[in-house]
């Protein structure tokens, strides 16, 4: 007999730490689960309404939210794909982000961009730029890569392009930001 599975979409689940916290909550509630990915958990078997409500409340207390609305789920899937590409893929795609996002979610990029902008109040392109700048900040503070290496790693066309985008978002050049935020 085949076991049923239920997919739950989780908002704000954007780090490996979030995955661990979600797994702990599932265990605490005695729920069987399969894959736990960024923004998506696969629950095995049937879950009671009581378990579902407890999971929703427990996750909400941790800053995570079980999503039921189809548009919100799609937007969260977009956020997770962008986060995964920028944060966790050491080999960022050589293709345009728009192509990769479209392919991973199996939707036309124009449609995804429109839904994203309507729900988030910011364009998908601006969101990607903001995420890339956040990643640059992290990499600068780790001090393992120089700006040229970071530029290459995040597929900027040049160090100048990275620097201009960084300054536009943060108000600081990468070197000033690094100097102001480096500990020790």
Image (spheres, rainbow, N blue to C red):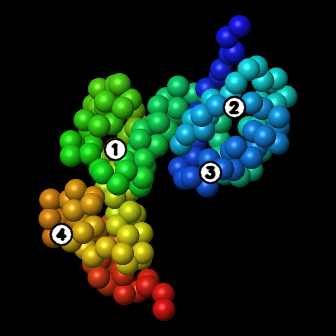
Give the residue displayed 40% in from the left and 63% down from the top: 134
The total number of labels drawn is 4
Tell me what residue is drawn at x 29 percent, y 37 percent.
100
Q: Which mark is residue 18?
A: 3
* Mark 1 crowd level (few <14, some 14–19, many ≥20, 10 Å Cα): many
At horizontal 74% and vertical 20% (from top left) the residue drawn is 45
Q: Is residue 4 above or below residue 142?
A: above
Is residue 177 left or right of 23 when viewed as pictured?
left
Point out the tag, 4 or 1, that comes first from the N-terminus: 1
Q: Which residue is mark 4?
A: 159
N-term mark: 2 or 3:
3
Query: Could you give the CA–CA distance between mark 3 and mark 4, rounded to whole angstroms?
Result: 33 Å
Task: Decide: few, some or many residues near mark 4? Use Cα within 10 Å; few <14, some 14-19, many ≥20.
Answer: some
- Estimate the spatial distance between the alpha carbons at disc 2 and disc 3, rounded to whole Å: 15 Å
Q: Secondary structure at mark 1?
A: helix
The spot of residue 165 in percent (x, y) is: 25, 65
Secondary element under disc 3, as helix, strand or loop, is helix
Cα–Cα gap, marks 4 and 1 = 23 Å
Q: Is residue 91 above or below residue 105?
A: below
Q: CA distance from mark 2 to mark 4?
A: 44 Å
* Marked residue nearer the N-terminal end (1 or 2): 2
Quadrant in the picture for residue 113: top left
> Quick one: SS at disc 4?
helix
Give the CA distance from mark 1 to mark 2: 32 Å
- Tag 1 residue: 124
How much space separates mark 1 and mark 3, taking CA atoms?
23 Å
């Amino acid at each position: 007999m085949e076991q049923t599975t239920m997919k739950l979409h989780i908002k704000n689940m954007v780090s490996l730490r979030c995955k661990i916290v979600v797994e702990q909550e599932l265990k605490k509630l005695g729920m069987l689960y399969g894959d736990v990915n960024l923004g998506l958990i696969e629950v095995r078997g049937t879950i009671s309404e009581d378990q579902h409500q407890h999971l929703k409340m427990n996750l909400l207390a941790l800053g995570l939210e079980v999503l039921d609305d189809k548009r919100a789920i799609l937007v969260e899937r977009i956020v997770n794909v962008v986060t995964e590409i920028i944060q966790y893929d050491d080999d960022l795609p050589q293709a345009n982000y728009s192509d990769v996002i479209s392919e991973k979610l199996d939707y036309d990029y124009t449609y995804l961009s429109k839904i994203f902008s309507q729900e988030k109040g910011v364009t998908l392109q601006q969101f990607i730029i903001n995420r890339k700048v956040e990643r640059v900040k992290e990499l600068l503070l780790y001090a393992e890569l120089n700006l040229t290496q970071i530029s290459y790693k995040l597929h900027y066309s040049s160090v100048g392009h990275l620097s201009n985008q960084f300054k536009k978002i943060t108000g600081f050049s990468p070197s000033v930001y690094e100097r102001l935020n480096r500990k020790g």
